[in-house]
Amino acid sequence: MNMYQYLTRAWNNPSDRHQEIMQKRMVEWRAEPSTLRIPKPSKLDRARKLGYRAKPGIIVVRQRLVRGGRQRPDIRAGRRTKHSRQRKILSMNYQQIAEQRAAKRFPNTEVLNSYFVAKDGTHFWFEVIMVDKSHPVIASDRHLSWMSGGKHNRRVFRGLTSAARKSRGLLHKGKGAEKLRPSMRAHDRKAK
């Protein structure tokens, strides 16, 4: 096994020592700002799978989100059934919201990807990999030069990141190997 496989195993099956370290980290993270640029990823194996490389033009941002508060309260008094609409306010998942908040804080960068780091009773933490697409190192990189094109502006706000596409059902593979387009629900409606 290589080093990254050992790291993945350590994150997936944490020892008691690992859990103590994470509890201490989360105490520190709660005192930090909600959006914070960090020098290197906490989960190096996951970050590298998603495109992170330790080179100029790529930064990592840790984003904290408050859990809950995403649904309308239950209706207590009499209402027309027409007005008892969708209870879930946001159609976005927490990871997509984290990406958008990081992108607002660093407007000259583009979101490449993100991953879950930790959660406690009140917060979620995600780390967002961001790319400065005007940086000459990025423009000359054969894996990231596609971001330098004009059509890849503000991807996170157009729902083009992996987290956004997953929440819309576009990463789900069913009925063979083809992706369900334009979404799982629309695909099911067409089939009926």
Image: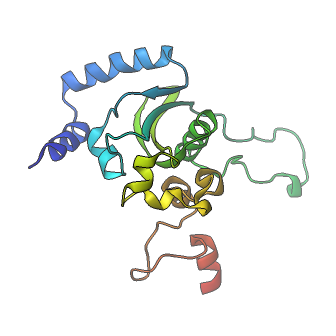
Q: Residue at x 44, y 76 (%)?
A: 174
Q: Is residue 69 above or below residue 20?
A: below
Q: Position of residue 100 (x, y in %)?
A: 61, 43
Q: Residue at x 48, y 45 (%)?
A: 135
Front residue (pair 5, 93): 5
Answer with left or right where residue 3 lies relative to residue 137.
Answer: left
- Quick check: can you spot residue 192? no
Quarter of the image with the C terminus in it: bottom right
Q: Position of residue 26 (x, y in %)?
A: 40, 20
Q: Is residue 40 above or below residue 99?
A: above
Q: Position of residue 32 (x, y in %)?
A: 50, 17
Answer with left or right where residue 1 lies relative to residue 35.
Answer: left
Q: Is residue 164 above or below residue 119?
A: below
Front residue (pair 56, 38): 56
Front residue (pair 52, 88): 52
Q: Residue at x 46, y 68 (%)?
A: 172
- Quick check: can you spot residue 83? yes
